[in-house]
Image (cartoon, helix red, strand yellow):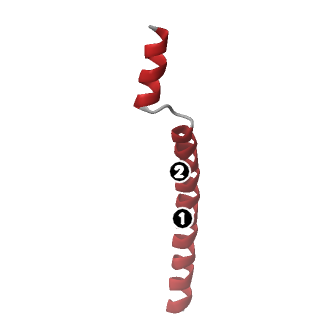
Amino acid sequence: MLLESEKQALEKELEVERKEHHSLKTEFQRVRLALEHSLSLAEHNAVTDKLK
């Protein structure tokens, strides 16, 4: 009985960890895409200098 309850507790913990992993993975992908589409400071300065 003790092993069964421990197994169930571990399965619940694993499910929580999987959900957290999925959430963090999604957030990472969102941030990575934002970074890939952002301008560097040098690019920003080059564009603003051209507009002056």
Distance from disc 2 to disc 1, alpha carbons, whole Å, reads: 18 Å
Q: Nearer the viewer, mark 2 or mark 1?
A: 2
Task: Please give the label number shown on residue 16.
Answer: 1
- Please give the name of the residue rendered at 41% of the width and 22% of the height, measured from the top-left corner: 45
Residue 41, quarter of the rendered image = top left
Q: Quadrant of residue 49?
A: top left
**Camera-side residue of 44 and 37:** 44
- Counting labels gives 2
Q: Position of residue 34 (x, y in %)?
A: 54, 38
Q: Are marks 2 and 1 in contact (CB under 8 Å)?
A: no
- Vertical comparison of 40 with 9: above or below: above
Residue 47, image x and y in percent? 49, 19
Give how far across and how far down residue 25 sits, in percent.
56, 55
Residue at the location (45% across, 16% down)?
A: 48
Split into 4 quadrants, where in the image is the N terminus? bottom right
Residue 4: image x %, image y %? 56, 88
Q: Is residue 27 above or below residue 47?
A: below
Q: Earlier in the sequence, mark 2 or mark 1?
A: 1
| Pick the front one: 44 or 30 | 44
Q: Residue at x 53, y 59 (%)?
A: 20
The numbered mark at residue 5 is none
- The amino acid sitting under disc 1 is Val
Mark 2 neighbour density, 10 Å: few (under 14) some (14–19) many (20 or more):
few
Image side of residue 22 versus residue 2, left or right:
right
Q: How many C-alpha atoms fall within 10 Å of the one at disc 1: few (<14), some, or many (≥20)?
A: few
Residue closer to the observer: 34 or 48? 48
Q: Quadrant of the C terminus?
A: top left
Q: Amino acid at mark 2?
A: Phe
Q: SS at mark 2?
A: helix
Numbered circle sitting on residue 28: 2
Q: Nearer the viewer, residue 22 or 10?
A: 22
The outermost residue toward the top is 52
